[in-house]
Amino acid sequence: MKNSIIILIFCFLYLSCGDNPLPKPQAYLRLEYPKAKYKLVNSPLPFVFDKNILAKPIDSINISGLTKGIDISYPSLKATIYLTYKEVNSTNLNSLLRDAQTLTQKHTIKADEIKQKEFLNGEHNVYGMFYEVGGDAASQSQFYVTDSTNHFLSGSLYFYTKPNYDSIYPASEYLKKDIKHLMESIRWKNN
């Protein structure tokens, strides 16, 4: 009986030995952000839009002449959406469109892909393009909107950190929704 127990213990020990233990993979933080709540902003520029209440109050900046800008800062996400406004005249619309598209295409060096989505809101005379930049590019989202006759607004999302797509992905996705909402909520003041 004693020999049977010893044999049984050795069998159990022999069978329990198997693969070498592996260390657990390094875990990443699960980042969750509050559900977006928006508030209408009557900007100092000739348009109004909705801004996420998570963002700081807007900072208006005068860039030069007909170009003006607004910074929408998200301190908790370490990001800013930079808006640049330019007046449209009869000769500069093609140049403004080309400049906005060129700015986005400059990110192809680091980007894995650039998806573009057309934006049309005929009821409020707002037309544009949204660019989603994938990979380790400096800006993860870019857009422009215009009424084709008086107003042109472009925007870019930048993070205050070296671009690492895997690390900033959750924040980038959250802010991408804010940018789309911003585009949908733009109303020109003189229309």
Image (spheres, rainbow, N blue to C red):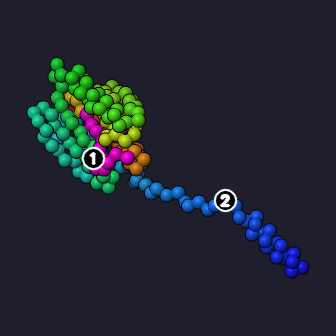
Find disc 2 in the rendering and name its residue: 19
Give whichever of discs 2 and 1 has the lower sequence position. Answer: 2
155 or 45: nearer the eye? Answer: 155
Q: In this orientation, does residue 126 appear?
A: no
Q: Position of residue 33 (x, y in %)?
A: 40, 53
Q: Measured from the top left, where is residue 31 in percent x and y?
A: 43, 55
The amino acid beneath tag 2 is Asp
Q: Is residue 158 magenta?
A: yes
Q: CA distance from mark 2 to mark 1?
A: 49 Å
In the rendered image, residue 113, in percent from the top left (x then y), is placed at 41, 33
Q: Quadrant of residue 24?
A: bottom right
Q: Which mark is residue 38?
A: none
Within-10-Å neighbours for mark 1: few <14, some 14–19, many 20+: some
What is the count of numbered marks? 2
Residue 80, which numbered label?
Answer: 1
- Tell me: 112 left or right of 106: right
- Crowd around label 2: few <14 · some 14–19 · many ≥20 (10 Å): few
Residue nearest the observer in this picture, 80 or 106: 106
Magenta-tinted stretch: 154-164
Three-letter code, disc 1: Thr
Q: Residue at x 39, y 40 (%)?
A: 135
